Image (cartoon, helix red, strand yellow):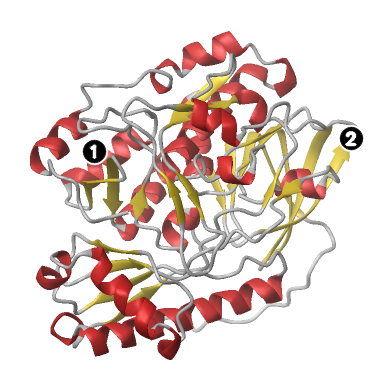
Amino acid sequence: MARHPGMRTVRRTAQAEALSADLCVVGSGAAGLSAALEARALGLSVIMVDAAPQLGGQAVNSAIGTICGLYANGMTPGRVTHGVMDPMLAELTASGQATARRARNTLIIDYSVNGWMRWVERQVLATDIMPVTGAVLRAVERQDRRIGTLHLATRWGDLAVTADSFVDASGDAVLSWLAGLDLQQADTDIHGTIMAVFEGVDTDIVNGMPRETYHAAMRARGDEFGLVRHDGFLFPLAEPGKVLANMTHIETPQDPVGLARAGMLGRAQVDGLLALFKAEFPDAFAEARVATYGQPGIRQTRTIEGRSRITVDGVRAGHRPDDAIARCSWPIELHTEMADTHWEVFADDHMHWIPFGAMVPQGLDNVITAGRCIDAEPAALASVRVMGPCFAMGRAAANAAAQVGAGSFHQIDVGALQTAIADNLETTTDDPWTAAFVSERGREADGV
């Protein structure tokens, strides 16, 4: 007979739990994941912190479902970013959880959110990265130009994290913010999106519908169904009968109550969108229902003041700075209007670059940013905040951390760093995915 459990008395202690490592990565989205796995492969001990209850950042929790900015432009676009996404893409492609399609003069990868999440978790367990989820960063200890300790609140109590260096992949430049540095933000709201997966859809019909067909319905009857956006996309998914909808806009308030309400309003828009589609396209959507509501997908909030800044003029001109560590040819994709999105698509031979200096906060020595909180003008950031360059920035951050150790990111050997990530600075024309996808899907798709 099983022993019935007894009881014992417990009481909270004032002392916080503590963790320490060579590197602490704040944020587990594309940039943070890349930084953590690359740093671990270089021999650093790594702690990866995220406020969400599971790893993956917006790639998982916001159900983004697409990887943009990973390829160059043109009919046979080569890869511009390599690193930890190489084995990820290989595994997801082999298992039917990642496919590609042509759109915006490039290739875009559609991926399974569950496939992404489980791949990440397997890598974290296999490499002994220390994951800390559900942990909200509430304060940092700063000594002169160095952050020494992060103070986090978890459901189990306070946690103190110390490290030689830190990668801020939070998306909101939270380390610089809590350290008291001046930050930048757009003088107008950059809208976010609630993504949603619809199931029970007749995808044969939907895949044959021109985008303008449902855009026209949204313009004509959107107000009736509570919609604010009149453009967006329906992405086919690998699972039969499912589509991914990117067709809402929400405000991006930088306070907890405002953001919670924005998410609720966005999910109401998803409901209205499905109701509109059921009314207008019953053959395709009569049996459809919402399978997944994403968490608020945030595009831009705060950015650091770095040693250098990415400008719109530099993006358009394809300027290559001396300290370039990543590049892409993704369009300027600006979400400043509720009803529509501004797109500026670039030519086949276009490439724009990310300088290392845009990742380094001016007032801190042992912090480097990666992802959407680097120093860039808002419209310029709109062309480099997508996943491809975020992966590349994470890789550069990890290699920089391995180089400086307990030193300063302001004293980096840029040449040595560029040598370490050389394949992210030259387009790979014999990429196996390019060859497979171009031969299989040679015409422009009605996608992003």
Residue 383 position, x and y percent, is: 49, 41
Q: Quadrant of the C terminus?
A: bottom left
Q: Mark 2 is on which residue type? A: Gln
Q: Quadrant of residue 138?
A: bottom right
Q: Mark 1 is on which residue type? A: Ala
23 up-or-down from 382: above or below: above
Residue 6 position, x and y percent, is: 59, 82
Residue 60 position, x and y percent, is: 42, 58
19 on left or right of 335: right
412 up-or-down from 37: above or below: above
- Of residues 232 and 152, which is closer to you in this image? 232
Q: Please rate how many residues cluster around mark 1, counting C-alpha atoms within 10 Å: few if below 14, some from 14 to 19, many from 20.
A: some
Label 1 sits on a secondary structure element that is helix
Residue extending furthest right? Answer: 144
- Whether residue 272 is visible, yes or no, is yes
Q: Please rate how many residues cluster around mark 2, counting C-alpha atoms within 10 Å: few if below 14, some from 14 to 19, many from 20.
A: few
Q: State the mark number for residue 90.
A: 1
Residue highlighted by disc 2: 143
